[in-house]
Image (cartoon, grey):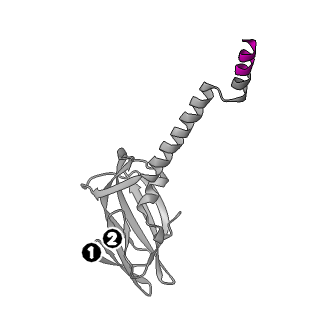
Amino acid sequence: MAEITEKESKQEKAGWSTGTKIIVGLIGLIIVLGLLAAFTLTVAVLDTPAGTSFPYSTTYRVSLPDGQPVTVGTTKILVMTYENEVVTEVDGVKEKLVVGQERVISPRYARVQALGVPLMDTDFQITLKYLGTSGKNALFDMNIKTSKQIPEMVISKLIPPGMNAVPV
């Protein structure tokens, strides 16, 4: 009988205790849920009523390919450059800009979800300031104003990779 007790004692020392196994399991579960939440993070964008204030602001330097449409949220933007001017078409509405001029895009509403659960929502407005051309791209400072403070990771989900957005 004493031999069995010694063997059991040695086995417990060699393996993980039940408490350690539970902690490792919980940490693993948290990591898996975190990864699932990150991969399922979505931003739904809709039109928003006027009259919203935008106290938070983030600015990016972006380049839009000349003659190729890009979509920011649900807003389709197309630019066509000529010398120091650009014609911007936003959701079918055209406007000519010269270097230094701004175009304000009508406000939108965004809801952020992960794993199908709404996490936050905000109203936002985009302003494009034309900076000139670089090769076959039109350069802009894109200012995104929001009604609530939103993490940069969420804002970057709105911006397509082809715009080469760099925080300013």
Stretch in magenta: 1-9
Q: Residue furthest top?
A: 1
**Front position in the image: 17 or 12:** 12
Q: Residue furthest bottom?
A: 83
**Front position in the image: 56 or 112:** 112
**Front position in the image: 64 or 4:** 4
Principal secondary structure, stretch drawn in magenta: helix
In this figure, which residue is indicated by the disc labeled 2? Answer: 76
Compared across the picture, whether 33 is left or right of 18 comes to left
Q: Is residue 3 magenta?
A: yes
In the structure shown, which secondary structural element does the residue marked by tag 1 occupy? loop
Is there CB contact under 8 Å for labels 1 and 2? Answer: yes
In the picture shown, does residue 12 fall above or below 152?
above
- Image quarter hosting the N terminus: top right
Q: Earlier in the sequence, mark 1 or mark 2?
A: 2
Compared across the picture, whether 50 is left or right of 161 comes to left
Q: Residue at x 75, y 12 (%)?
A: 2
Q: Residue at x 26, y 74 (%)?
A: 92
In this figure, which residue is indicated by the disc labeled 1? Answer: 92
What type is the residue that disc 1 sits on?
A: Gly
Image coords of residue 17 (percent x, y): 64, 26
